[in-house]
Image (cartoon, rainbow, N blue to C red):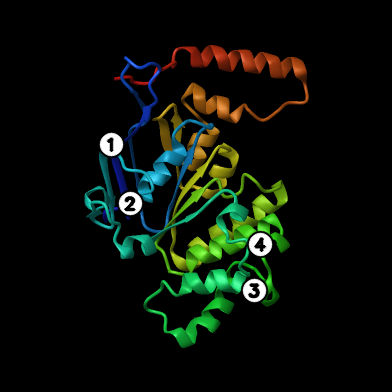
Amino acid sequence: MSEPLLKVDGLRVSFQRGRAGISLRPQRFDAVRGVSFDIPAGRTFGLVGESGSGKSTVGRAVLRLLRPTGGTIVFDGKEVTAFGRRTPRWYRRAVQVVFQDPLSSLNPNQVVATTLTQALAQNEALPHAERPAALRELLDQVGLAAHHARSLPRELSGGQRQRVAIARALAVRPRLIICDEPVSALDVSTQAQVINLLVQLQRDLGLSYLFVAHDLAVVRHMSHEIGVMYRGELVETGPGEQVYSAPTHPYTRMLLDSVPLPDPALQRRRRAERRTDLEEFSWQPTAS
């Protein structure tokens, strides 16, 4: 078998908590504890969990927005955790990100054409004269019309803004895109459209995704493999359909059962059963 495009092995990320008093030492909080997974080229690994589970921290460590405190990250055979302070430009082009809220990640004073042209300028293999054609191609790839190039972010819908964010990521021809809750701020019908777009782009361009979300049903539709995070640890991994249809960990079953039910009595009973199942998996953060 060929080596995976991304290999995360024993990843740990810790933060220092503030002092509780003058004489007390700062405490260390382990947000990610020994997480390991692989992403083959052209495949999607879904990372799912509730807020605070550490899933977004994993994505930010891969992007080198956070410095790991242990473990290794290897991309295309090169150890990312050995890069040092400066991240090579080739890595920043090869690994892109789509954040949850495109309105906060796009310049509010720039029209779409300016934003995408600036991204295209980072693609050293693209001559200046070819950028207008590349801009039109980007808009077409993500399902936007030519007139959207003249729009400011606030003039677009949430789904259209997210398509611009995806186009910006595509501009440098990445191999891996970190999707950090990319559809959680969208309504259900728009979520489906954006997910279908991401799937189609993967087929057309051979992209790999690390898809981070809290909704297991959404992750299931996107992912070939799923990892379930609970309090900084991967508690269950496996093929997407298997994890969704036959979960083995109580926390995974809790995520599946979190969809509201119309029967209040059944909802209360199911909530009590989830609480009982999870009691044995209680965990306290490491302090030092």
Rendered position, 247 above or below 156: above
- Foreground mark, 2 or 4, reads 4
Q: Nearer the viewer, mark 3 or mark 2?
A: 3
Dot 3 falls on a residue whose secondary structure is helix
Label 2 residue SS: strand
- Amino acid on which the number 2 mark rests in the picture: Leu
- Determine the residue positioned at 54% across, 70% down: 116
Q: Which of the two residues, 232 or 120, is positioned nearer the viewer here?
A: 120
Mark 3 neighbour class, 10 Å CA radius: few under 14, some 14 to 19, many 20 or more: some
Whether residue 261 sits left or right of residue 106 in the image: it is right
Q: Residue at x 53, y 49 (%)?
A: 222
N-terminal of the two: label 3 or label 2?
2
Q: What is the CA distance from the residue labelled 4 to the residue labelled 3?
A: 10 Å
Mark 1 and mark 4 lie on one chain; the one further toward the N terminus is 1
Return the residue at label 3: 149
Per the rendering, the mark at residue 31 is none
- The residue where tag 1 is placed is 69
Q: Quadrant of residue 25?
A: top left
N-terminal of the pair, mark 2 or mark 1, is 2
Name the residue rendered at 67%, 57% in the picture: 159
Residue under numbered circle 4: 153
Q: Which amino acid does the dot numbered 1 rest on?
A: Thr
* Rendered image: mark on residue 6: 2
* Whether residue 227 is visible: no
Amino acid type, callout 4: Pro
